[in-house]
Image: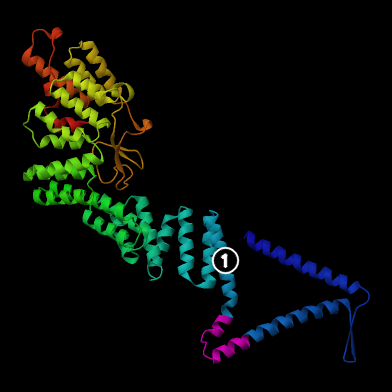
Amino acid sequence: MLWSIIKIVVFIALVAAAAIGAGYLLELDGGVRIVMAGQELNLTPLTAVIALLVLVAAIWVFLKLASLVIAILKFINGDETAISRYFDRNRQQKGYKALSEGMMALASGEGELAMAKASRAERYLRKPELTNLITAQAAEMSGNRRKAEEVYKRLLTNEKTRFVGVRGILKQKLAEGDTDTALKLAETAFALKPKHAEIQDTLLTLQAQNEDWTGARKTLNAKLKHGSLPRDVHKRRDAVLALSEARDVLDEGKDIEAREAAIEANRLSPDLIPAAVLAARGYIEKGSKRYAVRVLKKAWDARPHPDLAAVFAEIEPEETPEARLKRFAKLLKVHPENRETKLLEAELHIAAEDFPAARRALGDLAAVDPDARVLTIMAAVERGEGASDAVVKGWLARALSAPRGPQWVCENCHHIHAEWVPACDNCQSFDTLSWTAPPAASVSSSTGVEMLPLIVGSIEDDVSDKMPADPENEEIPDAEILDEPESETTDK
């Protein structure tokens, strides 16, 4: 309504301006004299203006007719679309102008204006592969998800724009959390454009979330084939997927298949700690202790880890603490200054009841890098050396409020995991977990409950068995502290 009123007002203003101009010309004296080929023509000012306008119009008509003649000649010479292009040229100019204005509006964040310009461009151009894309993106920008999905579905009908339509609906389903539909759409998009890096990553993430490890390995191989993934990263992630596949097989009770898959994962990436643990346990079950030692030593050489020490202890579960300390020397001499090596050696000495040696093994960790595990070991050392309950409880109290130390932390969102998983439980990122101390802001106050059985439980058992009558003067050896290295290391 407002636009119609504006147009009427503008038209009246233009008519009034033309009338005033004509009246002004009529009042002017003089005129225009044209002499050509012995002929003389005198024109009044108003007639001269009219003649000039007629001349401009005649030139414009002449140029248009000339263009039409050229188009007809091209048509006669075999160009079947020459005449149609001639008549559509003006429409195309208007259409492309509206299209460019729509793209500018889209880039400026003006969704409603972009949709209006795209609609105008479609009327002139009749090229939905161009205008529908702008309309869909503008509808998403404006929050009109239903309109965007409707346009994306229209894009599916055209072979040239089908991938764009699938990708658009895929992004919508991901935003809605409909991962099942998103996975099917990602597979369709991958089949249309297997080289598209974004679709490869999306499909790989969705397959990992749905624990489709076989499909994920195929997608990973496609990324390597099309050059979107370095070979060393591919090798590592393929090992992660093989390990995940092995764990699934193990849950199904297929021991032989799980063992083979774990060994394959360890072969692909020897420094992947969970793969080394699973492969070593497979060798132990098979009776191949020598291969288990080789796997664990290679992984320990890459990075010491408590899970590796726990499985190394499982190789000879019945050995004495002294024999275990001697056998573990193979690991202790690899990285003697490593923090994990010092902690492991201290625990082994505690199990052998050599508490001064355990204190020496810890060095200055309790002062410069204390965490719950270090402080708990110090409590065990103090108890073993006969310190008072107040001293022991003091170390345990510090352990309760100390940081937990290195854990499985997502490098992307810093989410802490109790155990290793192939994809982060929080942000769903694939292969982002690393064994490290979480950032200070991510660490909550530790209760230390899982550490108490390491010291308190064993001491209470010894008290009840050996010296129930005199708890104040008790001096209990802590031989049981590391008799179960698997659970002890796992708890950490």
Horizontal side, residue 316 vs residue 299: left or right: left
On screen, residue 209 above or below 312: below
On screen, residue 45 above or below 175: below
Horizontal side, residue 354 vs residue 287: left or right: right
The C terminus - image quarter? top left
**Residue 38 point in image, percent of width and height:** 90, 92
Residue at x-position 81% and y-position 70%? 19
Q: Return the residue found at the far right.
A: 29
In this view of the protein, which residue sits in the foreground, 137 or 434? 434
Horizontal side, residue 414 vs residue 46: left or right: left
Looking at the rendering, the stretch of residues picked out in magenta corresponds to: 68-86
**Residue 182 point in image, percent of width and height:** 31, 56
User: Residue 433: in sight, yes or no?
Assistant: yes
On screen, residue 232 above or below 163: above
Horizontal side, residue 71 vs residue 219: left or right: right
Q: Quadrant of residue 392?
A: top left
The amino acid on which the numbered mark 1 sits, given as a three-letter code, is: Ala
Task: State the SS at label 1.
Answer: helix
Q: What is the crowding at mark 1: few (fewer than 14 residues within 10 Å), some, or many (at least 20)? A: many
